[in-house]
Image (tube, rainbow, N blue to C red):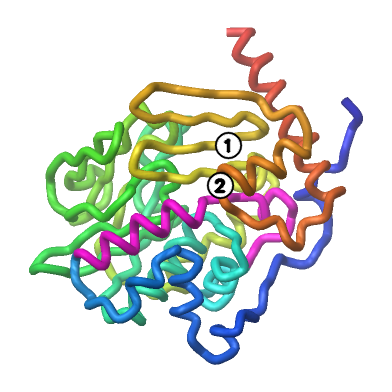
Amino acid sequence: MATTTHPSRRRAPPLRWSNGSVDARRGDRVAAYLRRLGRRDLAGAPADLDSLVALHRAHVERVAYETLPNVLGRPVPADADSSVAAMLAGRGGYCFHLNGAFGWLLERWGYAVVHHRAGVQGARDPGPVGANGNHLALTVELEGRPWLVDVGLGSALHEPVPLATGLSQQGPFRYAVRPSDLVPGGWRFDHDPVADSFVGMDLDLAPVSLVEATTRHTELSSSPTSPFVRALAVQRRDAEGVDLLRWNWLLRIDGAGRHERVLGSPGELTQVYGDVFGLSLDGVGEAELAAVYDSQAAAYERRLAKAAEG
């Protein structure tokens, strides 16, 4: 395979979108957002638990987690306006964008949204990382208790769960919520290992602003050592399971088991991006995408070779 320059090393402007839809120009970005979620029927619905669950389900089903802008070396800013613009342009994002935009939508719906610093323990982390700021989490107070609202965990929550000790089953995955072992007064979300993803997430209950919750965005979206830069990751949750793309390896996990295939070309990557994940590639050139495919295919081959070595 020919050697290519890793996209993250290139100097290029960040991916930005104007809020250019008709609704957005009129100032009605909420209506545009609902169209993106396929839930225009929710317009005018009360800010209650039923609406929150419906919005959360629609968001994870229609707006996939993706790290492509970071891999391209063109990270999207993590402020609310930039994140919402990305959603309206048919793109996704990672946790800072997804939860940042969803928090914006919920606030305008009338929900009392709280931003929290959190930390995701990855599959390769030897233990919990605490609320180290590599994740933005949201809570909403409803029916006299807080709910964990998180559309930025990729393979995890399909709908909100109470922020209280207990177990929940969503599709084929079982989750646990319990007090954090590392964060005083904080909470721990344990992911189901069947999902073949991250281990868990610790959340600091102290309220923070969106700016305070996303202080690590520049580092995590641009550092050559960041996992959010090195590896292409796209994830989309639905009621039955999850679709995951890592490198050029596509995996579906649901009640029927695991189904996987390796994408063999940039064209397959383009097709999967639209057909499986429902994401737009507007603004990404063919040469850029081909370079991403080559680098990710090479990374996947290195992973297989390392696994074969034991």
Query: Residue 101: horizontal and vertical position, in percent?
Result: 46, 69
Q: How many marks?
A: 2
Q: Examine the structure image and report whether residue 69 is included in the region drawn in magenta.
A: yes
Instruction: Find the residue positioned furthest to the left.
Output: 144
Query: Residue 225: horizontal and vertical position, in percent?
Result: 65, 43
Q: Nearer the viewer, residue 274 or 221?
A: 274
- Earlier in the chain: of badge 2 and badge 1, it is 1
Q: Answer few, some or many: residues within 10 Å of disc 1's Cα (few below 14, many 20 plus, some between 14 and 19).
A: many
- Majority secondary structure of the magenta segment? helix
Q: Could you say whether the residue bearing mark 2 is in a helix, strand or loop?
A: loop
Amino acid on which disc 2 is placed = Phe
Q: Nearer the viewer, residue 245 or 3?
A: 245
- Which residue is located at x 45 percent, y 64 percent? 37
Q: Can the viewer see residue 179?
A: yes
Vertical side of 282 occupied by 288: above or below: above
Q: Looking at the rendering, in which quadrant would you find the N terminus?
A: top right
Q: Could you say whether the residue bearing mark 1 is in a helix, strand or loop?
A: strand
Where residue 277 is drawn, which disc sits there? 2
Query: Residue 46: horizontal and vertical position, in percent?
Result: 22, 77
Vertical side of 178 occupied by 299: above or below: above
